[in-house]
Image (spheres, helix red, strand yellow):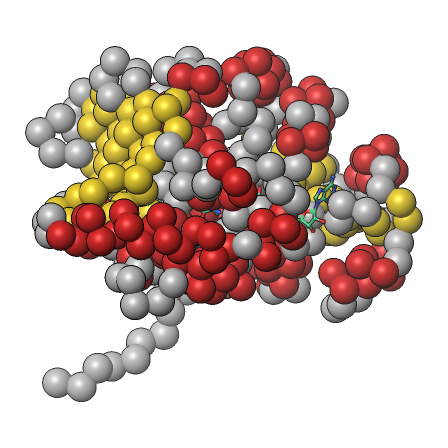
Amino acid sequence: MSAVLVEAPVRKSPEIAKADIAVVLLGTGVVGGAFLKLLCTPVAKRLHLVGAANSRKQQTDAAQLTARDLRERLKREGAARDDAALLSALDAHHAELKVVIDATASGELAARHAEWLARGYHVVTANKSLAGGHLAGWRALQAARAAGGRYGDSATVGAGLPVLSTLRRLCDCGDSLLTLEGVFSGSLSYLFNQYDGSRPFSALLRDARKLGYTEPDPRADLSGEDVARKLLILARNAGFALGTDEVVVESLVPEALRDLSTEAFLDRLEELDEPLAALHEAARARGQVLRFLARLNQRGRARVGITEVPLTHPAARLYGTDNQFALTTTRYHTQPLVIQGPGAGPEVTAQALLGDVLALG
Ligand SMILES: NC(=O)C1=CN([C@@H]2O[C@H](COP(=O)(O)OP(=O)(O)OC[C@H]3O[C@@H](n4cnc5c(N)ncnc54)[C@H](O)[C@@H]3O)[C@@H](O)[C@H]2O)C=CC1
Ligand SMILES: N[C@@H](CC=O)C(=O)O
């Protein structure tokens, strides 16, 4: 029987008019750039971009903000960075909902999220530095949320996979997280799913960077820091008050490459090849493969690092940038609840940001 194409079901839109949303976008790199493209699609018609910034320049001029090449223009022209001017642009707009979107990896900006929430702006973020950083920051964020601020964080774990939403829903229903295990990094998944020694690790890393899977400085991925942040975000959302120093992190970055500038590090990527090849060879000789795993056990002990796993291990059967989150809870006890799918990339991450913005009202 041949496949029949059917029309998509008509979704009756509710009669209630949805609110307009004024938006400031911080970060016009890989993720921010993909978000700007989504803004031009019909689903984003309620969103009004009133400001956009990269690390050096910003724009609040309405005509400039609608330019198709806004991202390129911001590299050359615009006003100097000043958060106050961006927030004033939000204040001046008629929209009921005012949102700051953080598509940067800046710790400095993340440290302002709680203050923005307290001032009545909503925050939607791909930046994990606050929720996955020092416990004091996490606590300030929870206080701002308890006071009514809405924080869209879907993009911070699994690049928008329904992990945080599922975990929170379970906890809201009285379930408790017992253990958490899996592959929480899209770039490291991409690297180790492919690495078989035939191409140098550094060449695969360059590909991952070009495809937009790595952090702005790929050492944030290779050091396990980015994975540790995601583990902390999940653990804290499940009620474990873990500090950054309570996660044992095993870095893949050799000592000699740790203190370099990003540019200097990128020039010396080949120095990763030999140690990785040795690890790979040792694992292969034992019939195992390498995976970068995150684990939280029932006593709240957390560890992220490279591990040899047998070919039958669930993490050995991932593809592309797949993330895998295995949640054992009081109610999902015999078998874990597993959430798996692409866990990095500009389009999925930008979609997660848009989803969080639209969910505001
Ligand atoms: N690439 C991915 O697949 C995913 C990325 N994320 C997160 O998204 C964030 C952005 O990642 P990418 O777009 O890949 O990085 P990127 O390096 O391509 O872009 C970062 C942007 O932030 C800007 N920026 C830095 N400091 C700033 C400041 N103080 N004010 C305004 N702009 C500033 C930079 O100029 C640049 O435009 C990171 O926090 C990352 O962890 C989250 C999920 C997936
Ligand atoms: N660099 C990150 C991107 C998503 O958070 C990763 O590799 O997972």
Total numbered badges shown on the rendered structure: 0
Residue 214 position in % (x across, y down): 50, 51
- Residue nearest the viewer, comparing 31 with 143: 31
Q: Position of residue 236 (x, y in %)?
A: 42, 20
Answer with left or right where residue 249 lies relative to residue 220. Answer: left
The reply to whether residue 83 is visible in this rendering is yes
Residue 221 at x, y = what percent? Answer: 47, 43
Residue 311 in sight in this render: no
Seen at 85% across and 56% down, the residue is 62
Which of the image's four quarters has the C terminus?
top right
Left or right for 168, reference 71: left
Position of residue 121 relative to residue 215, above or below, is above
Q: Is residue 214 left or right of residue 187?
A: right
- Residue at position x 59%, y 18% in the image: 137
Pick the residue in front: 47 or 113: 113
Instruction: Give residue 190's position: percent from left, percent from top.
Output: 36, 56
Residue at the limit of the structure toward the bottom, as seen here: 2
Answer left or right for 259 relative to 284.
right
- Locate the N terminus by quadrant: bottom left
Q: Residue at x 76, y 45 (%)?
A: 55
Of residue 94 and residue 38, the one placed in the foreground of this image is 38
Q: Is residue 252 above or below residue 36?
A: above
**Which of the 4 image quadrants contains residue 29?**
bottom right
**Corner quadrant of residue 204:** bottom left
